[in-house]
Image (cartoon, grey):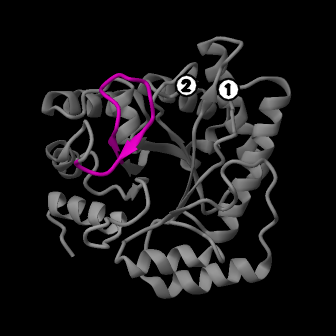
Amino acid sequence: MSVSGGLHKAIDAAVALKMDTVQIFTSSPSQWAAKPLDRPAIEAWHHTWKASGLVHPIAHASYLINLAGIDELFQKSVDALVDQWQRCEALHLNGLVVHPGAFTKTSEPEGIQKVAEGVIEAFQRVVPKHCRLLLENTAGQGTCLGHQISQLGSMIDRAIDQAPTLKKHIGVCIDTCHAFAAGYEIHKEEGLAAFCKELKTLLPRGSVKALHLNDSKKPLGSRVDRHEHIGHGAIGLEAFGRILNDSMFAKIPGYLETEKGRIDDSGLEWDAINMLALRNLSGKLA
């Protein structure tokens, strides 16, 4: 939800749409520099949150962060991650979602190692008490890492091996559009089962802490990240029904990242329509 007018405005917007949870950006996702959160902003967030009845608040990190990068880009990315993780700590958010990054000029193994190193450095500088870092699976465009679950597993395993206390502070956010674009056949019953098997075998137990629920404008294996409204894309309504009712995901908080706006004919907001579709599919109609 938008934080225009103050971070706490996202809570008000989520409550107005009868949502259960909310995801925000704590700063501009397309800029490195961020104005520090002042005490009034933090207090307004906590006051509004306490009265909201919402649960599991998370934030998404800047799209500029590239932990698989090298030299100046790597350090700039770690510094930005530290800043955003600290902001989440101040707001007592449950998670901070970050894309691992692209290895560009090096190699996949080197990129995976850099991500692990970046996560460890950020963790040691932040020393989190409230917020867990969530590595997100990606569509796999270019040299972006995280489109294979095995890559995410390697990043987390390496980070925990080098910093065991990190184990309770790291996890994964699964994006349905990204998984589909990366080539996972989650639109099919057998494909979803195979995907869940990878999650269970290649990630530490209980790693998946958040679910980004997005249909896909692009076809299976396109490696292109283009979100579509639920049931209006290549994944389809039937598949989302299976996803929401699978034991792997049924109790994991879900977040919409679909396009904002209203339907011309009815004036209804797309967020409300997508949410209603998902609740119908999950059998949890409010």
Residue 127, compared with residue 147, is above or below; it is below
Q: Which residue is the extreme one toward the front?
A: 265
Residue 240, compared with residue 162, is above or below; it is below
Q: Which residue is the extreme one toward the right?
A: 72
Q: Nearer the viewer, residue 170 or 181?
A: 181
Range covered by the magenta-colored residues: 214-231
Horizontally, residue 252 falls left or right of residue 166, namely left
Amino acid at dot 2: Leu
- Please tell me which residue is depicted at 82% across the width and 52% down the height of the picture: 33
Q: Is residue 226 magenta?
A: yes
Q: Which mark is residue 30?
A: none
Horizontally, residue 229 falls left or right of residue 72, namely left
Q: Where, quadrant-wise, is the C terminus in this rendering?
A: bottom left
Confirm or deny contact between disc 1 and disc 2 (CB under 8 A): yes
- Please tell me which residue is depicted at 72% across the width and 46% down the height of the picture: 81
Q: Is residue 81 magenta?
A: no
Residue denoted by label 2:
145
Q: Is residue 222 at all visible to an observer of this figure?
A: yes
**Where does the image place residue 96, in percent across and percent down from the top left?**
58, 53
* Quadrant hosting residue 20: bottom left
**Where does the image place residue 73, in percent across and percent down from the top left?**
80, 30
Q: Residues within 10 Å of mark 1 (few under 14, many from 20)?
A: many
Residue denoted by label 1:
68
Horizontally, residue 143 falls left or right of residue 42, namely left
- Please tell me which residue is depicted at 55% across the width and 19% down the height of the picture: 142
Q: Nearer the viewer, residue 75 or 63?
A: 63
Amino acid at dot 1: Ala
* Quadrant hosting residue 26: bottom right
